[in-house]
Image (cartoon, rainbow, N blue to C red):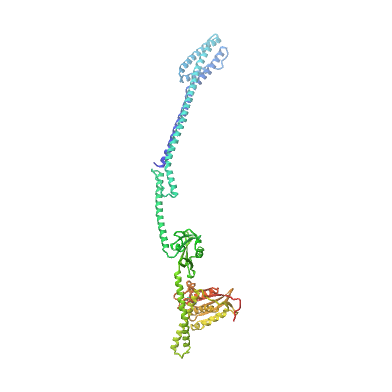
Amino acid sequence: MTLRHRLLLAQAPLAAALVLVGAASLRTVTFLGESGENILKDNYRSVLAAQRMNGALDLLDRDALARALGRAPAAPDALARQRFEAELKVQEGNITEPGEAEATSGLRAAWEKYQQALAAAGTAREPVAAYLDSVHRASMEVRGATDEVLAINQDAMVRKSNLARRASDRLLYLMVAATLAALGLGLVSSTILTARMVRPLSALSQAVRRFGEGDLEARALPKGKDEIAELGREFDTMADRLEEYRKSSLGDLLQAQQASQTAIDSLPDPVLVVDTEGVVLNLNQAAEALLRLPPGDGVGKPLHSLDPALRERLEAVRAHVLEGKGAVIPRGFEEAVRVEVPDGPRRLLPRATALYSAEGTVTGVTIVLQDVTRLMRFDELKNDLVATVAHEFRTPLTSLHMATHLLAEEAAGPLTEQQADLINAARRDCERLQGIVDDVLDLSRIQAGRIELHAKPVDARWLLAQAAAGVETSARASGLALAVEAPDDALPVLADPERADVVLTNLLGNAVRYTPSGGKIVARAKGAGPSVRFEVSDTGPGIPRQYQERIFERFFRVPGGKRGGVGLGLYISREIVRAHGGEMGVESEEGKGSTFWFTLPAASDAPKA
Ligand code: ADP
C-alpha cells in the first residue's frame, strides 16, 4: 500500500464519523421541520377556524340581539353566515385528532339548530324572549362545540410539540453520543494508523543519525513497498556504497601511505617533514637514527627539541621556504652543518622544498639532510692532494720558465727561427701552467679559509695601470686596443695591492683571451660612495644570461666557449673581492661584449707612495 493510500486510510475513521454525525443532524432537522409542519397543517388551521367561527357567531348574535330589541342590525346576516359556513367546511375537511370528527359533527348540528333558532326568532311575536330562549341557548351550544374543537386541537398541538421536543432531545443525545463515539473511534484508529505509518520513518531517521555519527553499518532495513520503504532502501544502497568506498579508499590510502613511508625510510639521508609552525609531521628512519629518537617518537614534536646547531639551520631553511623564496638548494659543502653523533661528527647539507595543499598554499616544508661527511672528507683529501701537487709543481715550473726565458732571450747562444718558435711556445705554455698552479694554490687557500690580506690605502689608478701594463703585450699581440679610464685625482682604495692586482689581471686576461682580434678593452675606476667601482669592458662574444651567475662558480666554463684556463679565475677573484668586503658581478649581452665589475672599499687616507 502506498503512503498516499495509508494517509487516506488514516483519515477514513474521522471522515466516517463526520458522515455519521451529519446524517444524524440532517435527520433531527428534518424531523423537527416535519413536526412543525404537521402541527401547523393538522391543528393550527382548526384552531384558526374555530376562532373565526366564534367571531362570525359574535356578529350574528349581536345582530340578532339588535333585531330583538328593534334596532337595525349593523350588517346583513348573510356575510357572517357565509364566513361561519366556510370555516366549518374547512374544519370538516381537517379532521386529524381522535374525537374531532364527533366534535365537528356536533358543531354542524349546533350550527343548524342555531340557524333555525335565528329564523324562528325573526318571526316570533316576543323577539326578546325568543332571543333569550332559543337563539342565545343555541348560540351557547355552537360556542360549546367550537370550544371543544378548539380544545381538541390545542391539546393536540401541546401534545405534539411535547412529543417533538422529546424526540429532538433524544436525537440530540444520540447525536452527541454518536459524535463522541465517532470522534473517539476516529482518533484512536487515526493514531494507530499514523503511528504504524510513522514507525518506518523513525527507524529510517535513526539509521541516518547513526550513520552520520560514523556507524557505517547502520541500515534502515525497511519492510513494505510504500514511499518510506523506498526511501529506506535508497538510503541503505547509498550507505552500502559509501561503506564500500570508505573501506576501499581507506585501504588505498593506507597502502599509499605505507608505500611513501617505506620509500622515505629507504632513503639513506635523514628526511623531515615539518608544518608551517615547525612541528614535525613525518620523518624517516635515518632521521630518527640521527636524532636518536625511538621509532615514531619525533612526529608531532616541534623542532625545538633538536640539537641547537641543527635546529637553527633547519629553522633558517624552513623560514626561507615559507617566506616564498623557493626551494633551498645548497651551493657548496660550506653550507653543511656539523652535528655531533656518538660515532663522530657528521656533516649534513640541508635542502628543502615547499609542501603545497590542493589549493596551492604552502602547508609545510620537506627537508632532506644530505649526509656529506664522506664526500667532504674526499673533497678535503682531493684539495690537499691538489694543493700539494701544485705546490710541488711550482719550483720546477719557475726553473723551467726561467730556462725557457733565458733560451728565448738567446742567453745560451743564438737560435734559429724554428728553435725560437719552439722555445716561445714552450715559454707560453709554461706561463699558462704557472697561472693554473697559482690559481689552484689560491683555491686551496680560499677553501682552507686562509686568504691573508694586507690591506692598505692604494690609488685605484695605480692598480689599473699596473694590471694594464701586465697584459699590454698580449693584448697588442692579439690585435686588441687597450685603454684605461680613470679620474685625474687620486682614487684611494683600501686593498691588498697584490690581491687586487690578481683580480684585475684575471679580468683583463679573460678580456684579452675571449675578445677576437680588432676588439677593444677598457679598464676603468670611479668613486661610488663608500666604495670604488672597477670595470673591465670588452667587445667580445658576451656571456649567455643563464651562465652569468654560474661563471663565478669553481671550475665552471661556458660550454662551447673558447679554451682558456680551468674555470677558477672568476671564483678566486670574487672570493678575493668579498674578503675585502666588496662585490663582484657581470653585465653582459650575448654578442655585445661584457663588463665585469667589482667594488673595493674607498680609503679615507691618501695612499702612501
Ligand atoms: P677561465 O680560466 O676558464 O677563464 P674564469 O673563471 O676566469 O675561468 O672564467 C670562467 C668562464 O667565463 C670562462 O671559461 C669563459 O667561458 C667565461 N668568461 C670569462 N670572462 C669572459 C669574457 N670577458 N668574455 C666572455 N666570456 C668570459
**Residue displayed at 42% across by 58% down:** 257
Q: Residue furthest top?
A: 125
Q: From the viewer's perspective, is 586 left or right of 607?
A: left
The image quarter containing residue 343 is: bottom left
From this viewpoint, is residue 564 visible? no
Relative image position of residue 488 (x, y in whole percent): 59, 80
Q: Nearer the viewer, residue 429 or 587?
A: 429
Left or right placement of residue 602 versus residue 180 in this view: right
Residue 189 is situated, as x and y percent measured from the top left of the image, at 43, 36
In the picture, which quadrant includes the N terminus? top left
Count every numbered label the image shows and give the total: 0
Q: Residue furthest front?
A: 342
From the viewer's perspective, is residue 111 above or below residue 272? above
Q: Is residue 373 visible?
A: yes
Residue drawn where x is 44% and y is 43% of the image: 202
Q: Position of residue 197 (x, y in %)?
A: 42, 41
| Towards the viewer: 514 or 354 | 354
Viewer-nearest residue: 475 or 116? 475
- Residue lying farthest bottom? 414
User: Residue 382, percent across and down?
Assistant: 45, 74
Quadrant holding the C terminus: bottom right
Residue 128 location, quadrant: top right
Residue at the outermost right position = 605
